[in-house]
Image (cartoon, rainbow, N blue to C red):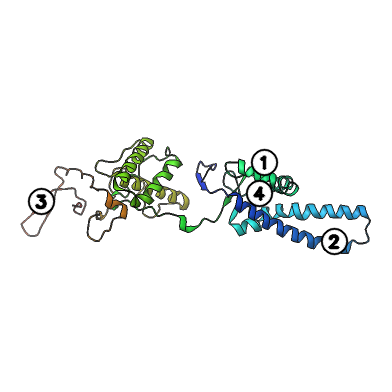
Amino acid sequence: MSGLVTGEAVALELRPAKLPSRMLAVVIDLAAAFAVYLAVTVGIVASTASLDDAAAAAVAVATFLLVLVGGPIAVETLSHGRSLGKLACGLRVVRDDGGPIRFRHALVRGAVGVVEILLTFGIVACIASLVSARGRRLGDVFAGTLVVRERVPAGRAAFVPPPPPWLAGRFSGLDLSGVPEGLWLAIRQYLTRMGQLDPQVGWGMAERLAADLAARTGTPAPPGVPPAAYLAAVVQERQTRDARRAFGGAAVGAAPVGMAGGAAPVGPPVPSAGAPGMVPPAGWAQQPMERAPLPPPVAGAGRESGSGGGTERTEGPATGFAPPG
């Protein structure tokens, strides 16, 4: 992943293109450009046969510049960084902040590409891409651009198991701004593979990751909550916030805005992971899960019910439903 940050301080997870895919895209672009150049050259030679040598040389240079240099610049500008080769390979040229390129970016890339690709047969571009941490050639460095993978195979996306239902919205008040992307990646990798780990090894990894996450957020896991469930709940909270920022408003499954981090959502009771009809994720079976202790009943918060002259007083908060057992 590429650690790009936009002007709004939003971290982008972009995959820089590798050298083989970039070379294939360049080969396709050059083949298409040379085919157009040969066709235009044949037409110009047939129509300017009566010109002298100086005029013919000037026309040849102008054709070279317009087709092999101006053509790729125009294509990248109009397509916002997707030439024919990049479109075939699933690549795209973007700015350093992740935005679409403009004419000046394409102009700098095309001008430098004449030297490092056409005149040196791509040797300089290959060396620069191998040396750069994000695979950028000299044209990308001077233009402030980056070639990224626009198509990512769907089969490589791993499923992150959801947390237990009784933890939904429990951590809506956490401050996640201090958690680095490396720690998020490690937590997601653990959650997607914890079903394949030895129970003792997985428990130790979950404890270490939970301790690191608690140190970054300033809020440890509540008593009685296993570390793996704590990690899954915090990851779900981050995904909910990202969806809310991306689509606006309250995302589906998000906790109500303004709810305290430790408050339970108001509404019908949610069955626990051990209730009938609820199948917990495969990873939770390896770790004992206990419900966090419920708050003590408020004194005097009873309610009367019954018909006729008899009354029955029941202790507990007047929420309209019995708390989960």
Q: Which residue is mark 3?
A: 313
Q: Which mark is in front, 2 or 4?
A: 2
Residue drawn 40% across the image and 53% down it? 251
Cβ atoms at labels 1 and 2 below 8 Å apart: no
291 vs 248, nearest the viewer:
291
Q: Is residue 140 visible?
A: no
Q: Which residue is mark 2?
A: 44
Q: CA distance from mark 3 to mark 1?
A: 77 Å
Q: Amino acid at mark 2?
A: Ile
| Residue extending farthest left | 309
Where disc 3 sits, the SS reads strand
Q: Which mark is in front, 3 or 1?
A: 1
Q: Amino acid at mark 1?
A: Phe
Where disc 2 sits, the SS reads helix
Residue drawn 75% across the image and 51% down it? 69
User: Circle 2: is it few (<14), some (14-19), or many (20+) Cα within 10 Å?
Assistant: some
Q: Which residue is mark 4?
A: 102
Where disc 4 sits, the SS reads loop
Where disc 1 sits, the SS reads helix
Q: Which mark is residue 311?
A: none
Q: What is the x, y in percent for residue 185?
A: 43, 45
Q: Which badge, 3 or 4, comes first in the chain's sequence?
A: 4
Q: Amino acid at mark 4?
A: Arg
Q: Which residue is mark 1?
A: 142
Q: CA distance from mark 1 to mark 4?
A: 14 Å
Q: What is the x, y in percent for residue 28?
A: 67, 58
Q: Which mark is in front, 1 or 4?
A: 1
Q: How many numbered marks does the figure carry?
A: 4
Q: What is the x, y in percent for residue 181?
A: 45, 42
